[in-house]
Image: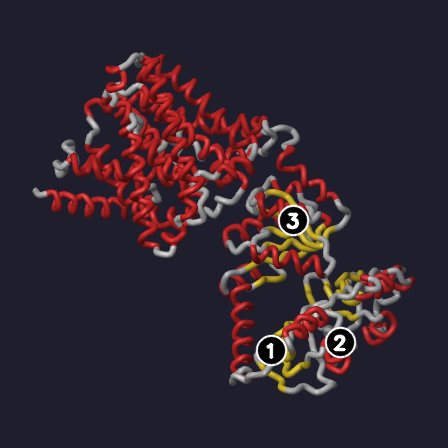
Amino acid sequence: MDNFAEIALLLVLAAALGAVGLKLRQPLIIMFLAVGILAGPSGLGIIESYSQIELLAHIGIALLLFIVGLRLDINLIRTIGPVALATGLGQIIFTSAIGFVIALLMGMPVISAVYVAVALTFSSTIIIVKLLSDKKEIDSLHGQIAVGFLIVQDIAAIVALIILTTFRPQAAAEHSPLISTFLIAVKGLLFFGCIGLLMRFILPRLRRLAQSPETLLLFAVAWAVFLAAVSEWLGFSKEVGAFMAGVSLASTEYRDSISSRLSSLRDFLLLFFFIDLGARLEWSTVGAGLTNAVIFSLFVLIGNPLIVLIIMGLMGYRRRTSFLAGLTVAQISEFSLIVAAMGVSLGHIPEETMGLITLVGVTTIFVSTYMILYSGPLYRLLAGPLKLFERKNPYRETVEGGAAKSDTVDVILFGLGNYGSGLAEHLLERRKSFIGVDFDPTVLDKWRRQGIPVLYGDLGDPDLHEQLPLDRARWVVSAIRSRELNLTLLGLLKHRGYTGKIALTAVNEKEAKLYEKQGAQVVFRPFHDAAEQAVDALTQAMELLTSNVNWPAAFSEIRLRPGSAYAGQTIRSIPLRAQTGASILAVSRAGTVHYDPGADFQVFPGDRLVIVGTPEQLARAQELLNHFPQPPAEEEIRFVMDQLPITENSPQAGQTLADLQFRVKYNVTVIGICRGEQKITSPGPNEKLSAGDRLIIIGTAQAVSRLKNSAPASA
């Protein structure tokens, strides 16, 4: 079979097994290893061109390390602070130490035990970032902490590769270990110094390359492979050079473009590394170490998360955050296999040790994937015992919770992303108090700097609701567009006995009806509402802006927002022309455009006013129309809905609504009557009241209070 046909068969096999892995929700690494095993001498015997596959594998590893260096975000480690360094270094130290002891107890030689211990410490950045991104948890606190200590692990892996370079057989044959180490250090300083000079003076000037995406991609690959070759020529490994090539471009403005374009090529070429690895596995040696592989796998799956739980618990994090972050280290990574493969090439470890590490990698990646995917149910199952790993006061996540102790709060708002932040800003404009809840520390810092009470938390976390003042909140609002999380929130609120109102955000009409059926009083439809407003604006523009006139005037559409000083007033009452010089040409309302409205035309919240004037005049008009006045007294303008019980001694019992004249006497309207299980909506004036009735009344806060405190009502 020629080389082309061989590669073609391997790709077909990889595509088929990749589809199986997709169905099983498994990372492709496992399926690529399976391709190598199936196509190798232990399987179908397809692979014959080992040298070609090995060359592609080396390029794939170079690109992997290049992208790791490219994404090396030191600022993230600074942002996360001590927890990333403490957890990353602590996990490396404890895992390697315990793993080394276990390996020695199994009777392994010291050098093999060292390699196994080092391999157990690394977790797969690629797999973890992919899984967290799929679950939309990459920006959560536990996601950022996990990415932070994964970066620490990546740096440790590079250091391990550099150290291994010192013990290459060629260096050992020419010089003593001390001299070899000194020479490597000198070469390293020169190598890193030259890269530093390039980073400072040359690489930032390559902006012209960014103008052509194809040229930029070609340069990135060439730069990664070139520095990998230079590194190997100097006596380092190819991996170190490729990593430094990435680091050298990490501070440039086009690093994100390079990274996104190279990811697919990296994944394709890594296919050959794992195929090569799977094909070279000796199953006779792997089977002999099966018991050892099970023991090491259990240590990685259980021991590594426990180490993270203990460290983060001592640092003051809640058990849920520690547990979710800990799950991300419950597997070994492609770096572990790279280090082990280098150990085999250097003659440090036998094929049996390589097979053992590979088997542990396959097992832990397979199992930990499901642990991360189903982390929510797994946490709920283990929440009780996990209290052992949490301080009595997990201060790092409850320090800002003191703001939740206020007497009253209008809204508890879950989700402070784009849509949630918009809701929050409008609540502030209307002088409503709210507590924000989000799992993105960056977003929380932004609101905290504005003096807004915020809490870190996940909407589906039952422990979070214990910290919220649900008994003093009028509304609970979710700005999160997730059916599963919103239904979970409804269930948790019912379990806590929440009696206030609930507003949820729906993606479509079917979801909105489901929320209303489950008890939500208000359902937001952001996509539907935005589409309707966009079509209104477009229709209006089609009608008004049909020609190009060379005149120094501009059009602007200004939406009259609720709470505006001029909402509900006539155009005559708006001093627009006098104060700004701009004029109202038309008013768009509910898809209908009212052209040249008269002076007595009344405008309402939500209307879109088409204004003409100079840009300066339009800016002043925007400020004027959406001015929010300071209300004289909130009780006089805020409408409330309340209940008025009719007892046996109440003088209202036996009288009709017409007799009582609530509207005339108290400026309060009766909109319903609860009579046992019966609910009477819009009762007529001749409806006679009975003892035990509960009247549903609505009016201003002051009017309702006056009615309830009146002598007849309290009798």
x and y percentages locating residue 419 in the rendered image: 57, 58
Q: Quadrant of the N terminus?
A: top left
Closer-to-camera residue (15/411) = 15
Q: Quadrant of residue 346?
A: top left
Cα–Cα span, label 3 and label 1? 36 Å
Q: Amino acid at mark 3?
A: Trp
Looking at the image, residue 679 sits to the left or right of residue 479; the answer is: right
Residue 512's spot in the image, x, y percent? 54, 62
Is the residue 385 above or below the residue 621 in the image? above
Q: Is residue 82 left or right of residue 400?
A: left
- In the rendered image, the quadrant that contains the C terminus is bottom right
Q: Position of residue 407 (x, y in %)?
A: 77, 47
Q: Which residue is mark 2?
A: 579
Tell me which amino acid carries mark 2.
Answer: Gln
Name above or below for residue 225 compared with residue 535: above
Q: Secondary structure at mark 2?
A: helix
Q: Which residue lies at the image location 53% right of the left edge and 33% below the top edge?
A: 322
Question: What residue does disc 1 label?
Answer: 554
The residue that label 3 is drawn on is: 447
Q: Residues within 10 Å of mark 2 (few under 14, many from 20)?
A: few
Label whose residue precedes the other's in the sequence (3 or 2): 3
Tell which of 320 and 500 is nearer to you.
Answer: 320
Contact flag, marks 3 and 1 (Cβ < 8 Å): no
Please name which of the two marks, 3 or 1, marks the residue nearer to the observer: 1
Q: Earlier in the sequence, mark 3 or mark 1?
A: 3
Residue 599 in view here: yes
Query: Please, which residue is most extreme toward the left here?
Result: 1
Dot 1 or dot 2: first in sequence order is 1
Residue at image coords 32%, 17%: 180
Q: Residue 514 location in percent, x, y?
A: 53, 60
Q: Is residue 680 left or right of residue 162?
A: right
In three-dimensional space, the C-alpha distance between marks 1 and 2, rounded to whole angstroms, equals 18 Å
